[in-house]
Image (cartoon, rainbow, N blue to C red):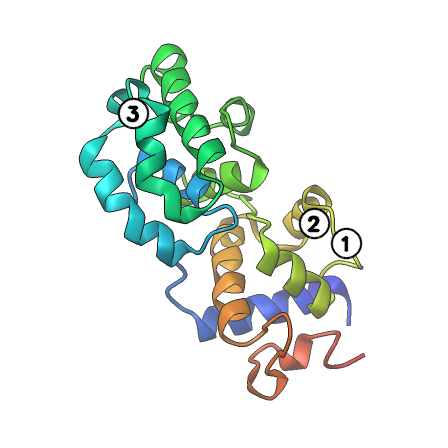
């Protein structure tokens, strides 16, 4: 089975198993989702969803956050972990958005990567979920693990290389939803320690299950 055939099989199986592929972070506003993505680093989406309503009640938009004291933001996000760096990045990002982009979240990879704390994973999520840019591939821990385990990539750990490889295998219009489905599947079935292969919809196409 070629990688292209394997990818097509996995794509179809996941699409049937998880028809509603959505980001598990709850915000849809570009600025608020960008904040949630930064908070989600080494933290669960569920925790972020619990923390941000109070944060956004105090700082409802980008301009309000740009005027915030980092120390106050820290108190709202403390339970998300690494709150010193996250609070600093969020405030500095808000300042840059106000000063450079008129308070709007930019819609290109190059511009997004100039924002403090924003890497390719975060940028691709914003591009895919907010701006619906075809070919957006969000490479998180689930994507890295499942792509290697299923044989879509060959023992790759570099997120940028995995992003490039998957972009070459997936239809551009399907890539963003595919990555969300990998997250759902990684949490429900293809666990890091004990994958439930007997329950896996991707079993026929998985290289680990069919070496």
| Residue under pointer 3 | 65
- The residue at which mark 2 appears reads as 162
Q: Nearer the viewer, residue 23 or 35?
A: 35
Write the residue at 49% across / 41% down: 82
Placement of 77 over or under 96, stated as above or below: below
- Please tell me which residue lies in front, 171 or 188: 188
Q: In the figure, residue 19 lies in which quadrant?
A: bottom left
Rounded to the nearest angstrom, the CA distance separating label 1 from label 3 is 38 Å
Q: Whole-percent x and y of residue 77? A: 35, 41
Whether residue 75 sits left or right of residue 147 in the image: it is: left
Examine the rendering and report whether any part of residue 24 can be seen: no
Can see residue 185?
Answer: yes
Is the C-beta separation of discs 2 and 1 under 8 Å? yes
Quarter of the image that includes the N terminus: bottom right
Kind of element beneath mark 1: loop
Residue sticking out furthest to the left: 57
Residue 123 x, y percent position in the rendering? 51, 36
**Residue 156 in picture, x, y percent from top left:** 77, 54
Query: From what the image shows, is residue 77 above or below residue 208?
Result: above
Q: Count of labels shown?
A: 3
Q: SS at mark 2?
A: helix
Q: CA distance from mark 3 to mark 2?
A: 34 Å
Residue marked by disc 1: 156
Left or right? Give the position of 21 relative to 32. right
Q: Nearer the viewer, mark 3 or mark 2?
A: 3
Q: Give the answer, above or below, for where 52 lies relative to 73.
A: below
- The residue sitting at 69% across, 44% down in the picture is 164
Residue 155 vs residue 174, the one in the foreground: 155
User: For residue 72, what is the image quadrant?
Assistant: top left
């Amino acid at each position: 089975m070629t990688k292209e055939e394997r990818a097509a099989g996995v794509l179809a199986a996941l699409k049937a198993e998880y028809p509603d592929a959505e980001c598990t972070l709850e915000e849809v506003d570009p600025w608020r989702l960008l904040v949630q993505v930064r908070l989600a680093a080494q933290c669960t989406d569920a925790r972020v969803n619990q923390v941000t309503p109070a944060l956004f009640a105090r700082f409802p938009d980008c301009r309000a956050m740009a005027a915030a004291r980092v120390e106050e933001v820290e108190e709202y996000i403390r339970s998300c972990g690494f709150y010193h760096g996250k609070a600093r990045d969020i405030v500095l990002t808000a300042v840059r958005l106000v000063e450079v982009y008129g308070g709007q979240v930019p819609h290109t990879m190059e511009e997004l990567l100039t924002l403090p704390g924003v890497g390719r994973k975060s940028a691709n999520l914003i591009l895919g979920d907010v701006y619906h840019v075809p070919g957006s591939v969000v490479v998180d821990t689930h994507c890295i693990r499942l792509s290697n385990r299923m044989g879509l990539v060959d023992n790759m750990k570099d997120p940028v290389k995995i992003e490039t490889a998957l972009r070459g295998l997936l239809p551009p219009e399907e890539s963003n939803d595919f990555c969300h489905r990998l997250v759902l599947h990684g949490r429900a079935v293809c666990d890091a320690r004990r994958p439930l292969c007997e329950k896996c919809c991707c079993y026929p196409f998985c290289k680990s299950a069919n070496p």
